[in-house]
Image: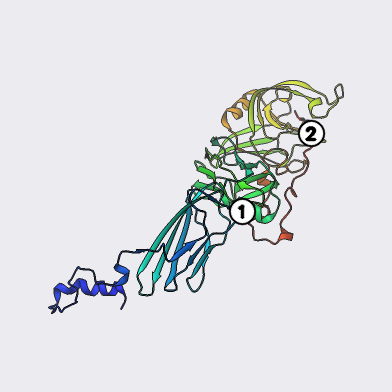
Amino acid sequence: MNHTQRIRTVVNCTLVVVTLVAGATACGEPDGHQLSLKPYDAADAVSFNGPGKGAKADPDKPIEVTAEDDDVTITDVTAVDTEGRHLAGELDADGKRWHSTTALAAGTRYTVKVATENGDGAPGTLTYDFGTNAAKKLLKISFGPQAGTYGVGQPITAELSAPVTDRASRATVERGLQVRSTPAVTGSWYWVDDKTLHYRPKEYWPAGASIDVRSNLKGIKLTDALHGAATKPLKLATGDRIEAITDASEHTMTVMRNGEVINTIPVTTGKPGFDTRNGVKVVLAKEQFVRMRGETVGIAAGSSESYDLPVYWATRVTWSGEYVHAAPWSTGSQGSANVSHGCTGMSTADAEWFFETVREGDIVKVVGSDGETMTPFDNGFGDWNLDWEAWQKGSALHRATQDATPDAGTDVRTARLRPQV
């Protein structure tokens, strides 16, 4: 009968007439079992290889707890740092030695709690507290975008202060970069290059979501020369689900809010040779006035295609100069022909309405154009133009084989500075 069973039996003693004899235990009193006794101090029976008083441990060296007394075994060891992270370890089968199995975090303190048991079954306990040396070189991480409210297409970015190239180190980085949203979604990081990661869900973020981004890498060993630095967390929110879908072949933009059409706008897109990019883009910025000149995107001044125009209500969707903007000079073609240099043009009133309706992170999708598909990373946020399977292959944690995982940047093509107005 185990101790719990004995307790349940004794509790019912008021219902039974019992004759107490010398040495018996009355109802409600301790039954004298060793495990019910106050744990003894196991300091004399256990040794610890940690640093002496006032010294600090080398985070690259494992810690060990050893039972020195033949009559004592170690039953449990927990090691927790000031960030609340548990250090992984392993206890030998004979209960005589416990050792850590992962590197300690640098620049932190650990509390190690040891539980023992002697030959009579009496419990013992012991606590150690020690610090670790600071790291010599830290990997700093900056999250983006800035805190605020964005559209449902907004990716999260992580910029690293130093390159991380090998798969195992990248996996450690990813495990430490935590993204939580309410409502919860399935998402993944993608290594754009050795110093840049993007995070997106499988589908667009839910409307009205709250998103918390933080790093748990402080002090964690990432490479032989790098440990994680403390990182400022990021809080984001999403607004309504705004999607603007331009059909270049129909010369029309349909704008939806949370799945319902709220406006249909006649537009003009890129003419042959300057075709607007197909695919999903994300609003990058809004500029009420922009001076657009052809030479800034590679058109020679004085050529038949050159231009120098004041442009109002300009919503940027690529870094190379593609906008949704007012184009009063092309109102005769809006809704019937494509005459721009790549931008989506509309009337001044419609452009102002669009400018006031959308926010950074909202979706601007183009279909029906003869242009190429928006590239994923080099010209804005084209992240959504990778399907979920391809996106997961950009993660070091994905279970695909090494050969199936593209090198960082495989899907990135050099942006063409295409003339646009």
Image position of 269 (left or right of 198): right
Q: Quadrant of the N terminus?
A: bottom left
Q: What is the three-letter code of the residue carrying label 1?
A: Thr
Q: Position of residue 113 (x, y in %)?
A: 43, 59
Q: Is residue 36 left or right of residue 56?
A: left
- The residue lying toward the viewer, choosing from 133 and 215, is 133
Q: Is residue 181 visible?
A: yes
Amino acid under label 2?
Arg
Color encoding of the figure:
rainbow
Above or below residue 56? Residue 359 is: above
Residue placed under numbered mark 1 in the picture: 172
Residue 377 point in image, percent of width and height = 70, 42
Q: Nearer the viewer, residue 214 or 131?
A: 131
Q: Quadrant of residue 205?
A: top right
| Residue 122 as seen in the image, left or right of residue 162 | left
Crowdedness near tag 1: few (<14), some (14–19) or many (≥20) residues, C-alpha within 10 Å: some
Residue 184 x, y percent position in the rendering: 50, 50
- Quick check: 106 above or below 67? above
> Tag 2's secondary structure?
loop
**Label 2 sits on residue:** 418
The numbered mark at residue 62 is: none
Q: Is residue 334 above or below residue 188?
A: above
Circle 1 — which element?
helix
Q: Residues within 10 Å of mark 2 (few under 14, many from 20)?
A: many
Query: Which residue: 54% across, 44% down?
Result: 214
Quadrant the C terminus occupies: top right
Q: Earlier in the sequence, mark 2 or mark 1?
A: 1
